[in-house]
Structures are given as C-alpha cells and as structure tokens.
Image: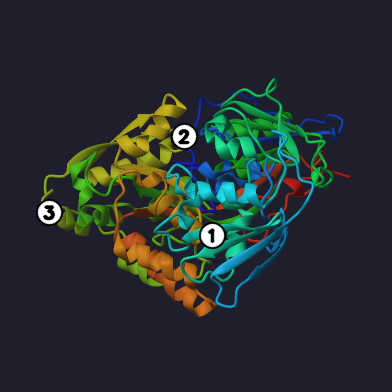
Amino acid sequence: MKLLSTPARRSAAVLAGALLLTPLTACGGGTQAATAVDKSALTIAVDSDSASFGFDPLRVADAQRQFFEGLYENLMTLQPDGSVAPGLAKEFSYSADNTVLTLTLKEGVTFTDGSTLDAALVKANLDRRSDPALSAYSAIAKGGAQEVTSVTVAGPTKVAIKFAKPQPGFEKNLTGTMGMIVGKTAAAKSASLATTPDGSGPYTLDATGTVKGNKYVFTKNGKSADAAKYPYTKITFSVIQDPQARANALVSGQADVAMLTSPTVDFAKSKGLGVSQIGGTLHTMVSFDKIGKTAPAFAQEKVRQAFQYAINRQALVDALHKGDIAAWNALPKDSAGFTEELNTRFAYDPAKAKSLLAEAGYASGFEFTIVGSAETQTDLQAVQKDLAAVGIKMNIKMATSTDEAFAAVATTPLGYAALGWDNPVGLMYGVVLNGFTNVQKATDEQLSAATGEAAAAKDDAARKTALTKLNTRLVESGWMIPLYESLTNQGYNTKKVQQVKFAGTNAYPLLSSYAPAN
C-alpha cells in the first residue's frame, strides 16, 4: 500500500510519497536516449517501494497490482478493456442465491517452492483471511461486508467459497491482490514472504540483481505457461522518489517507462517522450488518527471538518498543479458517487473553520506534526500556510527512511495520499476501514454501512446511491480531506516502447501490456 502523495491513481489503496527511500540520482537534459532498441529488457521507474512489506501480495492493495502480477497469478484476470476473465480459476459459478462461489482451477500450475495448484492450496490461501496484516483480505475477514464464512474443497480442482451475505459479481475482486495465490510453503509460513516470493507468475525475482528499496529485477519464469504473454525477458522496477529525477531517468534512457507528475509532463513531452494519461487520482489528506491518540484535537469531528474549510484548494491547484482539478469530493469527478453538493458545502471559508475550532474547544488553535517527502513537500507547505491562518500549526517533518514513513500512520494524526477509486469497496475495506491508515481502529457506522451497501449493490442505481453516501460521509467526517484530482501520467520512450495503454479505467497498466516499439 502506498502512502503520502503519489501521481498515480490508487485502486483499493495506495498510497506513496513519504513511504519511500532516498531517490536515485538521474541526469537531466538532452533528449531520450537514442540507443538500440533492447526488446529483451524493460525498466519501469516507479515512485515507491512496492515490496516495503516484503513479497506477500495480500499485505498490499491494488495500487501494487502491477508489481506483484509479475510474481503471482490471480484466480481471475483483469483484461485490457477492464473486464474480467479466467485466471488460475478457469471456470466459476454462483449458487442460485449468490452466497456460494465455486471455482474450477487450472491444472499443471507450479509455484517457485515446487508445490502445485489445487483446491487445498486455494483454501489454505483464503483461510489466511483472519490475519489482520493481510489488508487485501480485510473485506472477506470476519465482520467484513463481503465476509467469507467457509472455504470448502469440493474436489481436487474445485473450491467452494461461502459468503455470509449474497455477493453477486464478487469475481472482480479476484483480479486484484485479493485474488493472488501463494505457494504451499508461504501459505503455511507467511513469514517466508518477507524476503522470498512464492508465486507461479510469469517472472521470478532475481535476488542477485535486486537491491531492496532501490530496484527489483524480474526474470522470465520458464515454468509459467503464461510467460509467453509477456514480451520482455527481464523487467526492472527502479524506485525513484523524486518526480523530476524520474522524468530525467526517462529522458536519459535509464528508464523506458516512468510514472510522471503533472509538472513534469510538459518537460517529458518537450524531450520527445510519449505520455499516456487517465484521470481519477484523488490527492487527499487522510486522518490516520480519529480517536485522539497522537493528537487529542483529531478526536473531534468538528476539528477535522475545520480542515475542509481552511484549505484554499483552487489556489493550490493554480499555483502548483495547473491542469488538475480542485476537489472537495473524496471520489473522482467521473465516479458514480460524485456530488456537486460537496463542492458548495465545503467551499473555502476560513471564518467557518475558526468557528468550528472554537466550538470544539480549540479557539486558540493547536499544533501537530505531519511526515512529508520530497514529492509532498511543496503541497504540504501550501496547506501549512492555510492552516496557520486559522490557528492550526502543522509542523512538517521530512522522512529520513522508509521505516519512519510507514510508522507515521501510528505516530502522527494526518497523512497525505494519492488514492484511486477504481474499486471503492476494496479500497475502503483494504485501506480506510480495516487497513493500515486506520491503525487506531476507529469506527464510523455510516461509513461501514455505506461500504456494505456498495458491496451488495445489484444495479447501477443502488451502487450510485451507496457511493454517494460513502463519498459524503468521508468528507463530512473528515476521514478524508480531498485537495485535488489529477491525471495519472505514464511517460515512455517512443523509440523503445509502444504507446502505454490502461486497463479500462484502472490507472495501472497491465504488466503484460508493455511492448517493444516496432
């Protein structure tokens, strides 16, 4: 899961920024490197360390899907158009009441530990759902709106998943990290995944070329039947936190594809690079602490609401994010739950912010600390001035390590995230309600109810109603303090890589979609 501002849209969570190591240094200037096209290797410059928690795909959300789909296979697969197709499960069917999903598995699938796919292994994976560290499983754990009550081996290659409530369309969840399956060794002893992947994906980790937190090297898995769908023999994920350094790496030829922020898009285009774009990333301040453990003021909803009124979002966009959209909604403008009412209701009003603080007993304001990064620093400094104007002193501490940045969810009351809402239910259960942005275990009945309604919605109208409730409550409760909506930008070297395409509305291209230029 990625925390603190990243440029890419997050599905079911992520979050990056201060959760990153020191950026790599990349040289600037010039044009994209005019080297011979290497069709055997691809280097992708990313903004964060997807393996900060190790190589357990269940510990992260869909923001890390692209990285982990190189190492693991899903029970169902996401298609280039965003639709769902068979994966490790070659067939599926529901009971008449939609409370039981039966999967028929492929045969002949081998994992890196030597184990093979069967119904018992899938059951062993899904039975890990009681582990609170596995955020991808939080929605199906006991008490979740998509709770799985039992997993039964119905045959050597058949597994039956029983839900507490009807779950029509649940198969879509299995295209994300929730649907990734680990081998027998890892399913029995998940601690092994801290350092060693155990998957059946198209690639395996090259431990000799990998430097944790810096770069991850994948090489083709000769035992994978699906490896042929991936055109590159080797893929390297290069972790470069600084946005300009990522763009420079693309220009200089150190990277073939890179995640770009809006300010670096024009620079990349001026150097002859290609840029593919898709909307929907919400850059949002997230209240980690809603019970006042790290800062007493945050326990009061009126205080969190005061933040909504205190921040001049349009001024932030005009000064730092031209081309992006000021946001008062927690969900993207084109999403089903978006409502113009929030734009008016929480419009910039510092006097209202001061009034709410006074009502909450903080007429003289209060002080707290937020952890920042090179990527979030300028935004945080702009917000810092707005908050100071209403009496809130926000100290910005720059993270010096990944450990410090991740610890911020438990040691500071507020963070900054780039969230993608392609799968709102997954994001809510995997990140917001039960995930690591809520380590204080705060509860909100309205948020839980709205998320449950969205999960159970059987048609577009019901889904829109539920998501509107969810969006509204996220903002009025101050669990989310949205700032702006940005485009996700994937820059690519046109001499080496074909135009980058997104999978439907998902902001993360399929790893298999990257292809050498003709």
Q: Secondary structure at mark 2?
A: loop
> Is any atom of residue 204 visible in this view?
yes
Q: Nearer the viewer, mark 3 or mark 1?
A: 1
Cα–Cα span, label 2 and label 1: 22 Å
Q: Against 489, is 173 above or below?
A: below
Nearer to me, 52 or 378: 52
Q: Amino acid at mark 1?
A: Asn
Q: Which residue is mark 2?
A: 19
Q: Amino acid at mark 3?
A: Ala
Query: Which residue is pictured at 78% across the width and 30% down the height?
Result: 33
Frontmost residue, 274 versus 501: 501
What residue would you read off at disc 1? Answer: 423
- Mark 2 or mark 1, which has the lower sequence index? 2
Residue that badge 3 annotates: 358
Amino acid type for the residue under numbered disc 2: Leu
Dot 3 crowding, Cα within 10 Å, few <14, some 14–19, many 20+: some
Rendered location of residue 353, percent (x, y): 22, 55
Q: Earlier in the sequence, mark 2 or mark 3?
A: 2
Crowdedness near tag 2: few (<14), some (14–19) or many (≥20) residues, C-alpha within 10 Å: many
Task: Name the image quarter holding the C terminus.
Answer: top right
Within 10 angstroms of label 1, few (less than 14), some, or many (20 or more) residues?
A: some
Give the total number of marks visible in the rendering: 3
- Apparent side of residue 5 relative to residue 349 in the rendered image (left or right): right
In which quarter of the view is residue 47 placed? top right
